[in-house]
Structure formats: C-alpha cells, structure tokens
Amino acid sequence: MAGKRLIVGITGASGAVYGVRLLEELRARRGWESHLVLTEPGALNCWHELRLKRKDVERLAHAAYHPKDIAAAIASGSFLTEGMVIAPCSMKTLAAVAHALSNDLVSRAADVVLKERRRLVILPRETPFNLAHLKNLVAVTEMGGIAYPPMPAFYAKPRNLEQMIEHTVLRVLDLFGIHSTRVARWRGMAKT
Ligand SMILES: Cc1cc2nc3c(=O)[nH]c(=O)nc-3n(C[C@H](O)[C@H](O)[C@H](O)COP(=O)(O)O)c2cc1C
C-alpha cells in the first residue's frame, strides 16, 4: 500500500469547503491517500458555493468513486483504510449512516468503517436540528462514530473565514493522528 488511506465523503449539506479543504490538506501530506465519494447534491453545492465542478474536486483526491458505484473498493472491509470523514454531512446521509442503509457508496463506506471498528468522523450541518437529526447523531455516536459539527472555535481568534475553516479541518485531522503546527492550540489563558 502506497500510503494510509482516508475515505472522504462530500454530501449535499452547506459547507462544501470543508470537504475540499480536507482533500487539499491530505494531498499535501506524504504517506496519505484520499479516497473521495462526492454525491450529486454534494457536487451541486460545490458548484453553488465554490464554483468548482465535479472534476475539479475529484482531481484533488488520489482516487474518486461515483456514489452509485456500490462495487467500489471502499465498499468492502477487506480494502484497508484508516477510516472516513464525511464533510459536510447532510441530514439525509446522517440518517442513512445511523440506520445502516447502505443505499449509496457514502453510506455503504461509512457502514463498512463502523463494522470494521475503524474511525468515522462526520461533520453534520443543519440548523436548527429536529429530534430525528439528534437521535441519528446519538445512534452514530453509540456505534463509535464521532460527530464533529463544524462550529467555529472563537477561542482560536480567527481573523477570517479561511482561518476558521482551517481550524476545523486540522482538528478533524488531529482525530486521525495527523497533527499540524498551524492549529492554534490552547495553552492556558495567560499564553493567548
Ligand atoms: C443549496 C443547498 C443547501 C443545502 N444545505 C443543506 C444543509 O445544510 N444540510 C442538510 O442536511 N441538507 C442540505 N441540503 C439538502 C440536501 O442536499 C439534500 O437533503 C440531499 O438529498 C442530500 O443528499 P446527499 O446526502 O446524498 O448528498 C441543501 C440543498 C441545497 C440545494
């Protein structure tokens, strides 16, 4: 295996930039491969929010799969990965993951990651949440997944949107043991 593999799902919730920045960060790191699944609504939002076409986003990844390609490598637990990040994660995909629906490659890959007891991190984006969203977040958490809502860390004193987004993306990578000196790490009140 050339590098450690991380599956990245980008779905149709607002915040396509989180998935795109994640791919860019992985691309810049030696020893890591990104395996992307971009849903149709995800591609729509990449265009709407970032003016990026499907091929522009897929180009950032080491490998890209169509969400309907249920026979893709990442649909099997025998294909070794370190886990998966779904960024952003729509409430529809959250529901599919919470209920092991596996009706597209994003929810199947997440299902595989959970059954293999690998790391699943989702960046759910909706506001406000209804009770179904909250119950689905609990279900994913009970299965060992990590819900990481992309909420800005104001304590890091971001000066712009880019810094706010970067902080979230780098903290998600922390969860996979990929650490960066660019993270504004809390060292106590006196040191900030
Ligand atoms: C511009 C736009 C923004 C959207 N934002 C959200 C959102 O923030 N959260 C969400 O759960 N769904 C959002 N949706 C709806 C999802 O795209 C829709 O539920 C879709 O079926 C999700 O499919 P997917 O999870 O396969 O990508 C948005 C749709 C559009 C067109």
Image (cartoon, rainbow, N blue to C red):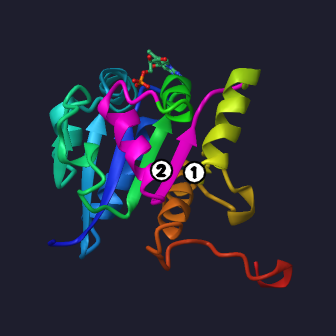
Residue sitting at x 38%, y 54%: 22
Residue sitting at x 52%, y 52%: 121
Q: Is residue 148 left or right of residue 3?
A: right
For the record, the magenta segment spans 101-128
Per the image, label 1 sits on a secondary structure element best described as loop
Residue sitting at x 51%, y 22%: 92
Q: x and y percent of residue 118 in the render?
A: 45, 60
Residue 18 in sight in this render: no
Which amino acid lies under the numbered mark 1 shown in the image of this protein?
Answer: Gly
Image: 2 above or below 126 = below
- Residue 19, located in which quarter of the rendered image? top left
Q: Is residue 124 left or right of residue 41?
A: right
Assess whether residue 76 is covered by the magenta stretch: no
Image: 19 above or below 92 = below
Q: What residue sits right under mark 2 in the picture?
A: 114
Q: Pick the quarter of the image with the N terminus.
A: bottom left
Cα distance in 3D space between marks 2 and 1: 7 Å
Q: Residues within 10 Å of mark 1 (few under 14, many from 20)?
A: many
Q: Is residue 166 left or right of residue 25?
A: right
Per the image, label 2 sits on a secondary structure element best described as helix
Q: Pick the quarter of the image with the C terminus.
A: bottom right
Choose the circle earlier in sequence order: 2 or 1.
Answer: 2
- Residue 185, located in which quarter of the rendered image? bottom right
- Are discs 2 and 1 less than 8 Å apart at CB? yes
Q: Which mark is residue 178?
A: none
Q: What residue sits right under mark 1 in the picture?
A: 145
Which amino acid lies under the numbered mark 2 shown in the image of this protein?
Answer: Leu
Judging depth in this view, the residue of 101 and 151 nearest the camera is 101
Q: Is residue 153 left or right of residue 102?
A: right
Q: x and y percent of residue 187 in the render?
A: 74, 82
Q: Which mark lies nearer to you, 2 or 1?
A: 2
